[in-house]
Image: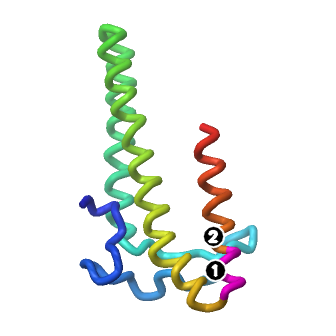
Amino acid sequence: MTALTAARPGQGAAPQAGAGGPTAGAGGGRPRRRYASGKADYLSRLRKIEGQVRGLQKMADAGTYCPDVVIQVASVTRAPQEVSVGLLTDHLHSCVVNAARASEDDGQASLGEVAATIRQVIRL
């Protein structure tokens, strides 16, 4: 398992203090939540992706053979998808579980939000 995959209940790292609990969100009235598997892991992975994209720019600037660039684009495309899966897994294992424990209505609302997110991602 990678650091981006949320620990299953009883398997490894516990959520950070406040994980899953709503806090004052910035704009939009959405609750802000902490990442169960660690914000630092996500930031590190996103920085690596940023470096990969800069590498693609250098390849294009240098006139690298097109099929080689396309292969690297495919590789770079997969990395943000893995981050998304990790974030959604964290959300399910912390936020959605906590909402379901709070009340059936909260649990249903949280599941609806997850379903809407998945629908949006699938449209890509």
Q: How is the image coloured?
A: rainbow
Q: Is residue 23 above or below residue 93?
A: below
Q: Nearer the viewer, residue 37 or 98?
A: 98
- Picture disc at residue 111: 2
Whole-percent x and y of residue 22? 60, 83
In which quarter of the view is residue 117 placed?
Answer: bottom right
- Give the residues drawn in magenta, as a range: 104-109
Relative vertical location of residue 44 with respect to residue 11 in this rendering, above or below: above
Kind of residue sitting beneath label 1: Gly
Say if the magenta span includes residue 85.
Answer: no
Q: Residue at x 59, y 75 (%)?
A: 32
Can you name the residue that lies furthest to the right here?
28
Q: Position of residue 111 (x, y in %)?
A: 63, 70
Q: Is residue 32 left or right of residue 15?
A: right
Left or right, residue 99 beside residue 90: right
Could you tell me residue 99's position as x and y percent?
60, 83
The three-letter amino acid code for the residue at tag 2 is Leu
The answer to which quarter of the image holds residue 56 is: top left
| Gap in angstroms between the C-alphas marked 1 and 2 | 6 Å
Q: Is residue 65 above or below residue 7?
A: above
Question: In terms of secondary structure, where does tag 2 sit?
Answer: helix
Q: Quadrant of the C terminus?
A: top right
Give coordinates of residue 67: x percent, y percent.
Answer: 34, 11
Q: Quadrant of the N terminus?
A: bottom left
- Residue at 33% x, 32% y is 75
Image disc number at residue 107? 1
Residue displayed at 65% across by 50% down: 119
Residue sitting at 70 percent across and 74 percent down?
109
Marks 1/2 in contact by CB < 8 Å: the verdict is yes
Residue nearest the viewer, comparing 104 with 93:
104
What is the chief secondary structure element of the magenta stretch? helix
Alpha-carbon neighbours of circle 2 within 10 Å: few (<14), some, or many (≥20)? Answer: some
